[in-house]
Image (cartoon, rainbow, N blue to C red):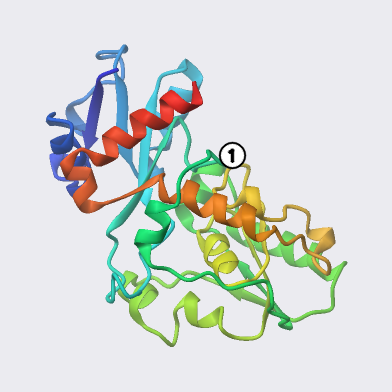
């Protein structure tokens, strides 16, 4: 299949890199029409392309969705500043779902550590969804938070901390005092989220996650039922390892977008799934 690389104003850096890796050119989304070339798939970035995504679902049209990667975009030994150098790419969905068996080379390459299920904290962190997923899924953020907290209080007397995403990307990713990574080192029993990558980070830190979105990469190793908040399921280490290998094959470094690695692995993944 050939792909149309949709780029806002023709200037989206990451779409441009991927188009280069495919030997293609970008198409400014402002001058493009959905009806053009219906036999071609679409490559797009960001959840605010929700109208196009939903139209593709309705019509059965293939698309590849790009957004921030799951692993390696926080400060770590290979990315000290926590730059957004990894990008997930998912075919016909927003998140990677069921685990696809993969080798562990890409996971090992990241050089990240995984904490065991040894944490016994006191507090529950509820991560409020951002505005963009609220628009996509038709959620009222305040109502979602209220409903989650109300349900939790029926099944636990633990302290509940509401986590709102800070407005500044720099503060979100680089301020150690306010970072989510720092919060996870504190007295945390579980993390509850809708679609945030916080679930992935919690599991990496050895903290159970509860995921409430219909589509989330952490679903294979997370809880979905808030009534079991006091006795959350903890996936075994083999399953978590398989899951991390799977996620590592679903995200790509800036350089891999540009050199064609991303396209090659994506095509291989589709062959496996067929």
- Classify mark 1: residues with Cα within 10 Å, few (<14), some (14-19) or many (20+): few
Front in this rendered view, residue 230 or 152: 230
Q: Is residue 55 visible?
A: no
- Using the image, determine if residue 122 lies above or below residue 241: below
Q: Residue at x 57, y 73 (%)?
A: 115
Q: Is residue 167 left or right of residue 209?
A: left
Q: Position of residue 50 (x, y in %)?
A: 43, 37
Q: Residue at x 62, y 74 (%)?
A: 162
Q: Position of residue 158 (x, y in %)?
A: 79, 79
Q: Which quadrant of the structure image shows residue 98?
A: top right
- Using the image, determine if residue 225 lies above or below residue 257: below
Front in this rendered view, residue 47 or 225: 225
- Using the image, determine if residue 172 lies above or below residue 14: below
Q: Is residue 234 left or right of residue 151?
A: left
Q: Position of residue 128 (x, y in %)?
A: 58, 64
Q: Residue at x 60, y 53 (%)?
A: 140
Q: Which quadrant of the structure image shows residue 75?
A: bottom left
Q: Residue at x 50, y 26 (%)?
A: 273
Q: Is residue 157 visible?
A: yes
Front in this rendered view, residue 211 or 245: 245
Q: Which quadrant of the structure image shows residue 229?
A: bottom right
Q: Secondary structure at mark 1?
A: loop
Q: Which residue is mark 1?
A: 98
Q: Quadrant of the N terminus?
A: top left
- Using the image, determine if residue 34 lies above or below residue 99: above
Q: Position of residue 14 (x, y in %)?
A: 22, 47
């Amino acid at each position: 299949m050939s792909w149309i690389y949709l780029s806002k104003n023709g200037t989206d850096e990451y779409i441009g890199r991927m188009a280069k890796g495919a030997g293609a050119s970008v198409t400014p989304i402002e001058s493009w029409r959905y009806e053009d070339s219906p036999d071609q798939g679409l490559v797009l970035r960001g959840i605010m392309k929700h109208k196009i995504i939903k139209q593709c679902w309705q019509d059965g049209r293939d698309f590849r969705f790009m957004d921030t990667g799951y692993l390696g975009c926080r400060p770590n030994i290979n990315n000290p500043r926590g730059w957004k150098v990894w990008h997930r790419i998912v075919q016909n969905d927003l998140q990677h779902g069921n685990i696809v068996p993969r080798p562990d080379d890409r996971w090992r390459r990241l050089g990240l550590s995984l904490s065991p299920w040894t944490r016994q904290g006191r507090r529950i962190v509820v991560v409020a969804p951002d505005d963009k997923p609220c628009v996509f899924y038709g959620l009222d953020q305040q109502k979602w938070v209220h409903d989650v907290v109300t349900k939790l209080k029926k099944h636990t007397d633990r302290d509940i901390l509401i986590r709102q995403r800070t407005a500044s990307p720099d503060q979100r990713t680089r301020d150690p005092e306010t970072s989510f990574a720092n919060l996870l080192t504190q007295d945390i029993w579980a993390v509850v989220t809708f679609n945030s990558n916080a679930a992935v980070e919690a599991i990496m830190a050895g903290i159970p996650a509860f995921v409430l979105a219909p589509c989330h990469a952490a679903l294979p190793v997370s809880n979905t039922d808030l009534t079991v908040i006091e006795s959350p399921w903890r996936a075994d280490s083999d399953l978590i390892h398989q899951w991390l290998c799977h996620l590592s094959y679903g995200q790509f470094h800036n350089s891999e977008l540009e050199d064609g690695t991303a396209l090659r692995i994506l095509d291989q993944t589709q062959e496996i799934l067929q």
